[in-house]
Amino acid sequence: MSSFLAHRLRIAAGSAARNHVVLFARQQQSYAALNSASDIQQTSNEVVPVFKNAVRFGDRTALRDAHGDYTYRGLFLSSRQFATQLSEILGDSRQERVAFLVPNDANYVITQWACWMSGQIAVPLSSLHPTPILDYYIKDSDARIIVTTTEHLPLLEPIVAKTNRRLIVLDDALRILAMKAGKTANNKSTTEYDVENTLDAGIKGDFYNKSDALFIYTSGTTGKPKGVVLSHRNLQSQINALVSAWKWTEKDTLLHTLPLHHIHGIVNALLCPLYVGARCVMLQKFETSSVWGQLLAVNTQNTERVNMYMAVPTSYMKLIQEYDQLFNKNAKMKEYIHAVCSTKIRLMISGSAPLPKPIFDRWEEITGHRLLERYGMSETGMMLSNPLEGQRVPGTVGTPLPGVQVRITRTEHGSLEPKVLVQGNVKESRKLVNEKEPIAGDLEVKGDNVFKKYWNNPGATAKEFTSDGWFKTGDTVQYNNGVYKILGRSSVDIIKTGGYKVSALDVETVILGHPNVQDCAVVGLPDITWGQKVAAIVVVKEGSELILSQLREYSKKSLPEYATPTVLKIVDKIPKNNMGKVNKPNLLDTVFPKTMV
């Protein structure tokens, strides 16, 4: 065994059978204490992390994954055990970064909660990212511990082997211990265990009122991805806004099919249900047949069926395609699907990319649901939302969420300071100028939901905030008839495809490394399925040639698949100005003049 492998920490039930039984016995002994816990009294200034809320919900089912059901108490106690392991490694250190790459199952929740119980910062990774990006995230965050499972070990082991970082490989022990009674193979009583106060989890005092919780990496228009630092207060503000606006309750059951390294999957679809005692049905990945099966409660008891679903527009488009292939010619099935979705599911939400009106209309025809569109970003969580009850206008993102302030500004010709055109909050939005609607300009936001900083990047942080503390979203927004509509990025170098944000400059950097490429520009083409397609406009070297399949295979070595170009256009020259910059809107009109949504 190499010194590196010896350095790796493995939490294993098989190698420590007695410890496994003791852990289970401790959990069983502690259930009564969890059940008798009084509700947490939360003041407006007190931050209560999700794991502290969990003690209120005892043996209620919190999560169902591919393996089975998990209770709130089970997740709490397994997370606490893992938090102890992290603390043994890190000692008295707090706010260390713990990067983790685990499947979309209970191990994700256990790892996330354990990070927060031990006072550390969670840095979720994705298996969609190739080795160079994972390596960058780990090094940039300066993560001291890397957590993964056996299936993802080949991705991370080569990266960690070159460093002195600690690698923890989870087996199924803690996940099994968190399962609902009757679901495990080890739910036997034992008289040999130590009694301890399991309610005493987390850091004491006002630690969570002033500490950081999460890094989410997001690409900007220039340079490398930036680590968005979100505090526990940021997360609680974001959760509270959505719980209030969408009326989350413990009776809800959400179907989760989203990636868990984005704000959409982490906050909207995971923390919100777990914070209020609701249930989350988590699929390993999005698959149309599995989603339709859950929405229609195939082989599911009525008490366990889902009543909420969140997805990106691409997912809804794929669900529509499957519906058209399987059900559209069967009148009885069409009637059944409409009846089930319209009566058994209370809310369906679309976000992370603009929702084309044809998808909105077709989904309403199929299910009876007018999709609720909302708007947010990694730095702020959700900012704007269509109403839960009331008119939802296709293509708009509604009004400000509770606790969020927004304003629209515009810098007039010859002016040094932007002018505030509209300012709004959850109660009202007011026009501050005497202009006919609609009013368009740059969207800015303020509130406890807004992130603290970009990790180790004070220059970028300062650049994105105004002198009076408003965060500049970089999006152009329109205000009309009391609602907001996102018109697009103020910069054309961010491409939103399938719910992901792709930096065109990052893609260009990779393409320019191809031996046959002399010059290139990357743009986003409107697309009804993906929101936008990544299109590469390329000048090849003399005597060379390039086809799309070759470019995609080359790009996949350094980019996630969703960032690789799906359109290739070979041109003789890419026009540039005297500063060497490309006017991409003009280039887009010239090269793709008939592109339509």
Image (cartoon, grey):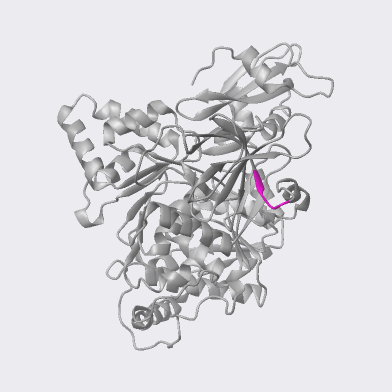
Q: Residue furthest front?
A: 434
Q: Is residue 574 visible?
A: yes
Instruction: Give how far across and how far down residue 378 sits, in percent.
Output: 58, 48
Which residue is at the front of the view, 382 or 497?
A: 382
Q: Residue furthest right?
A: 578
Q: What is the magenta segment's predominant secondary structure?
A: loop
| Vertical side of 348 occupied by 61: above or below | below
Please report the residue visible at 40 percent of the width from the left and 82 percent of the height from the top. Answer: 26
> Start and end of the magenta stretch?
468-472
Please report the residue visible at 51 percent of the width from the left and 63 percent of the height from the top. Answer: 111
Which residue is at the front of the view, 375 or 193?
A: 375
Q: Quadrant of residue 349?
A: top left
Instruction: Give how far across and how far down residue 67 sits, in percent.
Output: 35, 57
Please report the residue visible at 58 percent of the width from the left and 43 percent of the height from the top. Answer: 129
Q: Is residue 424 magenta?
A: no
| Vertical side of 382 occupied by 357: above or below | above
